[in-house]
Image: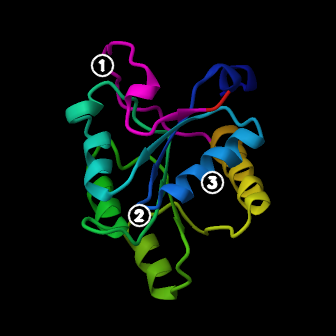
Amino acid sequence: MADSERKDQSFAILMIDDDEEDFVLVKESLESRHVKVDLYWAPDGNEAMNFLFRQGEYTNVPHPNLILLDLNMPGKDGFEVLRDLKAHKDLRKIPVVILTSSRDESSVSRGYNIGASSFMLKPLSFDEMANAMQSLCEYWFALVQLPKNPAEPARKTVKKESISSAYSSP
Protein backbone atom coordinates (compact mmCIF):
# COMPACT_ATOMS: atom_id res chain seq x y z
CA MET A 1 0.00 0.00 0.00
CA ALA A 2 1.36 3.39 -0.93
CA ASP A 3 2.14 5.87 1.83
CA SER A 4 -0.48 8.27 0.46
CA GLU A 5 -3.12 5.53 0.69
CA ARG A 6 -2.16 4.80 4.30
CA LYS A 7 -2.44 8.47 5.25
CA ASP A 8 -5.99 8.57 3.90
CA GLN A 9 -7.00 5.30 5.54
CA SER A 10 -8.73 5.27 8.88
CA PHE A 11 -7.53 2.69 11.38
CA ALA A 12 -9.57 1.31 14.24
CA ILE A 13 -8.28 -0.27 17.44
CA LEU A 14 -10.47 -2.21 19.84
CA MET A 15 -9.08 -2.28 23.38
CA ILE A 16 -10.50 -5.10 25.48
CA ASP A 17 -9.66 -4.44 29.12
CA ASP A 18 -11.71 -4.37 32.30
CA ASP A 19 -9.64 -1.50 33.74
CA GLU A 20 -11.02 1.83 32.52
CA GLU A 21 -7.92 3.61 33.81
CA ASP A 22 -5.80 1.56 31.39
CA PHE A 23 -8.13 2.53 28.55
CA VAL A 24 -7.86 6.22 29.48
CA LEU A 25 -4.06 5.90 29.67
CA VAL A 26 -3.92 4.39 26.17
CA LYS A 27 -6.36 7.00 24.84
CA GLU A 28 -4.40 9.91 26.32
CA SER A 29 -1.10 8.37 25.16
CA LEU A 30 -2.34 8.22 21.57
CA GLU A 31 -3.72 11.72 21.87
CA SER A 32 -0.42 13.10 23.22
CA ARG A 33 1.46 11.74 20.21
CA HIS A 34 -1.23 12.86 17.73
CA VAL A 35 -1.71 9.28 16.53
CA LYS A 36 -4.82 9.27 14.36
CA VAL A 37 -6.82 6.14 15.06
CA ASP A 38 -10.36 5.37 16.12
CA LEU A 39 -10.10 3.77 19.55
CA TYR A 40 -12.96 1.69 20.91
CA TRP A 41 -13.21 0.07 24.33
CA ALA A 42 -14.87 -3.13 25.49
CA PRO A 43 -14.69 -3.51 29.27
CA ASP A 44 -15.06 -7.30 29.22
CA GLY A 45 -14.92 -10.34 26.97
CA ASN A 46 -18.67 -10.58 26.39
CA GLU A 47 -18.89 -6.91 25.36
CA ALA A 48 -15.91 -7.47 23.05
CA MET A 49 -17.66 -10.36 21.33
CA ASN A 50 -20.78 -8.22 20.85
CA PHE A 51 -18.57 -5.54 19.28
CA LEU A 52 -16.69 -7.99 17.04
CA PHE A 53 -19.86 -9.77 15.90
CA ARG A 54 -21.73 -6.44 15.62
CA GLN A 55 -24.52 -7.38 17.95
CA GLY A 56 -26.87 -5.14 19.90
CA GLU A 57 -25.70 -1.54 20.04
CA TYR A 58 -22.66 -2.42 17.91
CA THR A 59 -24.38 -3.17 14.59
CA ASN A 60 -22.78 -0.16 12.90
CA VAL A 61 -19.19 -0.33 14.16
CA PRO A 62 -16.21 -1.11 11.93
CA HIS A 63 -14.15 -4.24 12.28
CA PRO A 64 -10.99 -3.18 14.10
CA ASN A 65 -7.64 -3.29 12.31
CA LEU A 66 -5.93 -4.18 15.60
CA ILE A 67 -7.02 -5.51 18.98
CA LEU A 68 -5.32 -4.74 22.29
CA LEU A 69 -6.32 -7.54 24.65
CA ASP A 70 -5.92 -7.87 28.40
CA LEU A 71 -5.81 -11.44 29.69
CA ASN A 72 -7.14 -11.09 33.21
CA MET A 73 -10.78 -10.08 33.08
CA PRO A 74 -13.83 -11.31 34.96
CA GLY A 75 -16.21 -13.56 33.04
CA LYS A 76 -14.87 -14.35 29.57
CA ASP A 77 -11.12 -13.82 29.98
CA GLY A 78 -8.62 -12.76 27.32
CA PHE A 79 -7.66 -16.32 26.40
CA GLU A 80 -11.31 -17.19 25.73
CA VAL A 81 -11.78 -14.03 23.63
CA LEU A 82 -8.64 -14.84 21.65
CA ARG A 83 -9.75 -18.45 21.10
CA ASP A 84 -13.22 -17.37 19.89
CA LEU A 85 -11.77 -14.64 17.68
CA LYS A 86 -9.26 -16.95 16.02
CA ALA A 87 -11.98 -19.56 15.42
CA HIS A 88 -13.98 -17.15 13.23
CA LYS A 89 -12.93 -17.08 9.56
CA ASP A 90 -13.47 -13.33 9.04
CA LEU A 91 -12.08 -12.17 12.37
CA ARG A 92 -9.02 -14.42 12.73
CA LYS A 93 -6.99 -12.13 10.45
CA ILE A 94 -7.19 -9.22 12.88
CA PRO A 95 -3.87 -8.89 14.69
CA VAL A 96 -4.17 -9.26 18.44
CA VAL A 97 -1.61 -7.70 20.75
CA ILE A 98 -1.88 -9.02 24.26
CA LEU A 99 -1.37 -6.01 26.52
CA THR A 100 -1.08 -7.20 30.08
CA SER A 101 0.73 -6.70 33.36
CA SER A 102 1.33 -10.45 33.71
CA ARG A 103 4.90 -11.65 33.41
CA ASP A 104 3.85 -15.29 33.59
CA GLU A 105 5.81 -17.27 30.97
CA SER A 106 3.03 -19.85 30.64
CA SER A 107 0.61 -17.03 29.72
CA VAL A 108 3.00 -15.85 27.01
CA SER A 109 3.23 -19.38 25.54
CA ARG A 110 -0.49 -19.96 25.82
CA GLY A 111 -1.29 -16.62 24.14
CA TYR A 112 1.00 -17.32 21.19
CA ASN A 113 -0.31 -20.88 20.90
CA ILE A 114 -3.87 -19.61 20.62
CA GLY A 115 -2.92 -17.07 17.95
CA ALA A 116 -1.73 -13.81 19.51
CA SER A 117 0.30 -11.63 17.15
CA SER A 118 2.46 -10.25 19.94
CA PHE A 119 2.68 -9.99 23.70
CA MET A 120 3.41 -6.67 25.37
CA LEU A 121 3.80 -5.77 29.03
CA LYS A 122 1.80 -2.73 30.07
CA PRO A 123 4.17 0.19 30.51
CA LEU A 124 4.09 1.70 33.99
CA SER A 125 4.46 5.41 33.19
CA PHE A 126 2.59 7.74 30.88
CA ASP A 127 5.70 8.47 28.78
CA GLU A 128 6.48 4.77 28.40
CA MET A 129 2.87 4.09 27.35
CA ALA A 130 2.91 6.99 24.87
CA ASN A 131 6.15 5.71 23.33
CA ALA A 132 4.81 2.16 23.20
CA MET A 133 1.50 3.17 21.58
CA GLN A 134 3.23 5.36 19.02
CA SER A 135 5.64 2.53 18.10
CA LEU A 136 2.82 -0.02 18.05
CA CYS A 137 0.74 2.11 15.66
CA GLU A 138 3.72 2.90 13.45
CA TYR A 139 4.49 -0.80 13.20
CA TRP A 140 0.95 -2.08 12.54
CA PHE A 141 -0.33 0.82 10.44
CA ALA A 142 2.76 2.06 8.58
CA LEU A 143 5.19 -0.85 8.21
CA VAL A 144 3.04 -3.98 8.11
CA GLN A 145 0.67 -4.89 5.29
CA LEU A 146 -2.61 -5.77 6.97
CA PRO A 147 -5.27 -7.89 5.30
CA LYS A 148 -8.34 -6.05 4.12
CA ASN A 149 -11.22 -6.14 6.53
CA PRO A 150 -14.10 -8.40 5.55
CA ALA A 151 -16.57 -6.82 3.16
CA GLU A 152 -18.16 -4.03 5.11
CA PRO A 153 -21.91 -3.86 4.68
CA ALA A 154 -23.42 -0.44 4.07
CA ARG A 155 -23.82 1.18 7.46
CA LYS A 156 -25.59 4.20 8.72
CA THR A 157 -23.26 6.86 10.01
CA VAL A 158 -23.03 6.67 13.77
CA LYS A 159 -21.48 9.14 16.12
CA LYS A 160 -18.58 7.49 17.89
CA GLU A 161 -19.80 9.06 21.14
CA SER A 162 -22.89 6.86 20.91
CA ILE A 163 -20.73 3.75 21.00
CA SER A 164 -19.73 2.59 24.47
CA SER A 165 -16.66 4.57 25.52
CA ALA A 166 -15.44 5.11 21.96
CA TYR A 167 -12.70 7.58 21.23
CA SER A 168 -11.36 9.09 18.05
CA SER A 169 -8.12 11.01 18.32
CA PRO A 170 -7.77 14.39 16.58
Left or right relative to 34: residue 69: left
**For residue 115, which numbered disc appears in the image?**
2
Give residue 149's quadrant in the image: top left
- Disc 3 versus disc 2: distance between alpha carbons? 26 Å
Give residue 55's quadrant in the image: top left
How crowded is the residue under tag 2: few (<14 C-alpha within 10 Å), some, or many (20+)?
Answer: some
Left or right relative to 134: residue 87: left
Query: Measuring 45% from the left and 64% from the top, which residue is drawn there?
Result: 70
Q: Could you tell me which quadrant the C terminus lies in? A: top right
- Residue with the mark numbered 1: 153
Give the percent coordinates (x, y) of residue 103. 56, 83
Give residue 101's quadrant in the image: bottom right
Query: Measuring 38% from the left and 31% from the top, which residue is drawn there?
Result: 163
Q: Secondary structure at mark 1?
A: loop
Which mark sits nearer the N-terminus, 3 or 2? 3
Left or right relative to 153: residue 123: right
- Residue with the mark numbered 3: 25
Q: Amino acid at mark 1?
A: Pro
Give the percent coordinates (x, y) of residue 19. 46, 61
Q: Amino acid at mark 2?
A: Gly
- The answer to whether residue 87 of the structure is visible from this angle is no
**According to the image, what is the colour scheme of the structure?**
rainbow
Q: Is residue 64 above or below residue 118?
A: above
